Image (tube, helix red, strand yellow):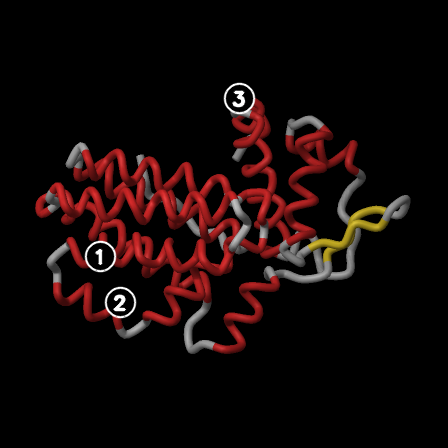
Amino acid sequence: MSPQAMLNGKSSQVTEQAVEVIHQRIQQGSYAIGSALPSQRDLAAQLGISRASLREALTRLAALGLLEIKAGKGVYVISQHSQAAEQWDGEHRVSLKDFYQLRYVLEGFCALLACEYLTDQDKTILQQHYENLAHAIKEQDWQAASEFDYAFHQHVIELSHNQSIIQTLKMHTEWIKKSQILPFVQPNLAFKTIQEHDLILQALFQQDAPAAEKAMRVHIIGAAQRAGVYFSRHDS
């Protein structure tokens, strides 16, 4: 990603892109564990963004457990992986990144298929799950939010009528539930979950299959990033 590309984005997008670039440099070892990042002035110049956007990006990475910000001393790399990813990887047979990628593929396709079978009753159920999710987030009840999030996604999965996918994901119910609460490690970004589900809902209600698939995949990518996991996008 070129600095110019980052300059051309909206403020929130610029920050998200900066987070991704810095995260990638940490992953690749360009910023080694224990080392200090370039000064904020130099790093902002390298990325072609404002220092305010850079500070927000650094704060997010610190919240994920990758950086430590030492007042008057600089910003230091303390881990290559987010705390959520490290904990997950230590408890499961597959990495958190691998599992989000599985959800990206299968749940995106489920959203596409769901458009063929959606009824007015399904619309009512999904709308209720969405409203419950939004209310829980606004109340900062993260456990309830993750449960309503699961209910929303599960209904979309069931609507696919693809028993192979349904049974595959059912075997990983607890993993799915856990992956849905991890993004709330950054509460200040929880509003994005509401926005993303709203776009999924709109596409489903319009029974626009390609848009529903894309909206679901954009959401899975967003959720993964809020948990500190990044992988390549394949949406146009």
Where disc 1 sits, the SS reads helix
Check residue 8 in the rendering and tell me which mark sits there, or answer none: 3
Badge 3: few (under 14), some or many (20 or more) residues near its Cα, within 10 Å?
few
* Residue nearest the observer in this picture, 72 or 122: 122
Amino acid type, callout 2:
Leu
Q: Nearer the viewer, residue 233 or 115?
A: 115
Return the disc, 1 or 2, that comes first in the chain's sequence. 1
Mark 1, residues whose alpha carbon is within 10 Å: few (<14), some, or many (≥20)? many
Above-or-below relation of 176 to 183? below
SS at circle 3: loop
Q: Is residue 213 above or below residue 51?
A: below
Can you give x and y, in whole percent of width and height, for residue 185 in the image? 57, 55
**Residue that numbered label 1 is attached to:** 157
Type of amino acid at the residue the image marks with label 1: Ile
Of residues 170 and 118, the one nearer the viewer is: 118
x then y, percent, for residue 64 = 63, 55
- 87 up-or-down from 123: above or below: below
Q: Which mark is residue 169?
A: 2
**The residue tagged with tag 2: helix, strand or loop?**
helix
Q: Nearer the viewer, mark 3 or mark 1?
A: 1
